[in-house]
Every structure is written in C-alpha cells, then in structure tokens.
Amino acid sequence: MAAPQPCADSSCCSHPGAVPGVQQTLEEMDFERGIWSAALNGDLGRVKYFIQKATDPSQPDSAGYTALAAEKGHEDICSLLLQHSPALKAVRDRKARLACDLLPCNSGLRDLLAI
C-alpha cells in the first residue's frame, strides 16, 4: 500500500481530498446542529424535535444568544419557544439586550415579547 502523497504545494496535511481554506470550528458546528440554527432558519419541525428531546431553549449559544434571539421574526417559532420556556423573555445576551431589543421596530412580535 502506497503512502499518502503530499499536496502539490506541500502546505497541507496528508489528508487526501482536504479542501484548503474550508474549516469550521466546533462552536460553528454546535450552532448549525442545534436549536439556534433551526430557529434562525425558521425550521419549526427541527425546533419541535429539539424541544421534544429536552433541549433547553434558554441555553445560549457560544455567542450568548438564545434560540429566541436567533429566531429572526418567525412568529410560530417564537410562540413555541415561549410556550416551553416563558422565562426566555427576560434572558439577556452578553450585551445585556433582551430578544425584543433585537427585533426591527415594525416587528409584530414586540407585543408577544414584551415583559
């Protein structure tokens, strides 16, 4: 069996097929695989799945945001998250902002998130 051949420019690892410049941190992978990404992308089915698996919606991601702060105006997801964790309204991020502080001024979710 032949030894793996080094890359043409000799700068990468011996892993064949590695794509230079494409990397993802563990924090990024956790975000994409977690409730935060599902909320951000409006994927109600995945958010329900995480809640059924006892994922705590108030658990912040590595940047300090909860799924509620990530949900970006999806009223159905916002309602579901608050139904399972009403205290989310009062959770602040690292900059002391509430989820309602991150909404656009004309968002219909302001009343739902009012404390």
Image (cartoon, rainbow, N blue to C red):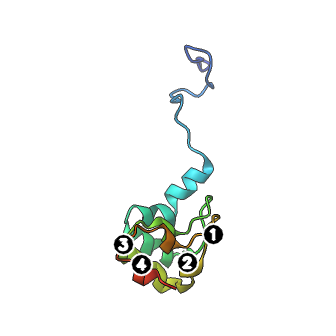
Q: Which residue is mark 2?
A: 54
The mark found on residue 107 in the picture is 3
Q: CA distance from mark 2 to mark 1?
A: 26 Å
* Label 2 or label 1, whichever comes before in sequence order: 2
Q: Quadrant of residue 97?
A: bottom right
The mark found on residue 110 in the picture is 4
Q: CA distance from mark 2 to mark 3?
A: 29 Å
- Which residue lies at the image location 57% right of the left edge and 14% below the top edge? 9
Q: CA distance from mark 1 to mark 4?
A: 17 Å
Q: CA distance from mark 3 to mark 1?
A: 20 Å
* Label 4 or label 2, whichever comes before in sequence order: 2
Please rate how many residues cluster around mark 1, counting C-alpha atoms within 10 Å: few if below 14, some from 14 to 19, many from 20.
few
Position in image of residue 24 (x %, y %): 56, 43
Position in image of residue 63 (x %, y %): 61, 58
Q: Tell me the element at label 3.
A: loop
Q: Which residue is mark 1?
A: 96
